[in-house]
Structure formats: C-alpha cells, structure tokens
Amino acid sequence: MEIVMENKNDFERYQNARKQVDEIKGFYSHLASFILVMMVLIYVNLKYTPDYLWFFWSMLGWGIGVFCHALKVFNWFPFLNKEWEERKIKAFMEEEKNKRKYE
C-alpha cells in the first residue's frame, strides 16, 4: 500500500498516526507478555506451593503497569493527554523565548 502525501501537513499527520500505531503495538506486546508470564507463574504457584498464592502479588504489580500503559496509549488520562503536552511544550518554548529576550 502506498500513501501519497500532498504537503507537509499530510506528512506530519502520517508521522503522528504512525507513532500512535507503534504505541498501540507496543501496548499489545506488553499485554501479551503479561498474560503469558502470568499463566506460567500461576501454573508454577499452583503446582509447587498451592497453600500460598504468591502469584497474586506479581499480577497486581505488573497489572498496574499494564493498566497505566493502556491509559497512556489510548489517551484515557483526563489531565495528561496530547493537548496538555502541546500546551506545556508551547509554554516552555515561550518561556525560553522570553528569557533570551531579556539576556
């Protein structure tokens, strides 16, 4: 499949879309490894030490990480989303510009 870009704006949108797709792929890889490793840990735990369910602690810790990864990738952060990032970048750029003016 060939993508034809007419101008610079199309290229920037393509780059942003490509970055988003790469982030989503990274999340699904993270989720798949989480599921596979948890299956192994549950098996080992139930086979060798069924009296104490220790796999739960690794599942809880890593699960929080997977959840936070999902929040970031799918823009579910209500306060740290892309618009917030853009505003902060612009604010820092303005601050730097103003500093140079007074030097």
Image (cartoon, grey):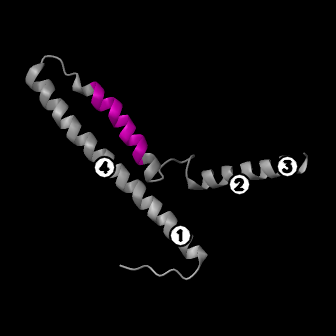
The magenta-colored residue range is 57-70
- Quarter of the figure with the C terminus: top right
Which numbered marker is on residue 13? 1
**Residue sitting at 43 percent across and 79 percent down?**
3
Mark sitting earlier along the chain (4/3) = 4
- Residue most toward the right? 102
Q: Nearer the viewer, mark 4 or mark 3?
A: 3
The spot of residue 24 in percent (x, y) is: 38, 55
Task: Give the distance between the C-alpha atoms of the residues marked 1 and 4, in whole angstroms.
Answer: 24 Å
Q: Secondary structure at mark 1?
A: helix
Which numbered marker is on residue 29? 4
Q: Are marks 4 and 2 in contact (CB under 8 Å)?
A: no
Mark sitting earlier along the chain (4/2) = 4
- Is 10 placed above or below 48 here? below
Task: Assess whether residue 87 is covered by the magenta stretch.
Answer: no
Q: Amino acid at mark 3?
A: Arg
Task: Give the distance between the C-alpha atoms of the residues marked 1 and 2, in whole angstroms.
Answer: 19 Å
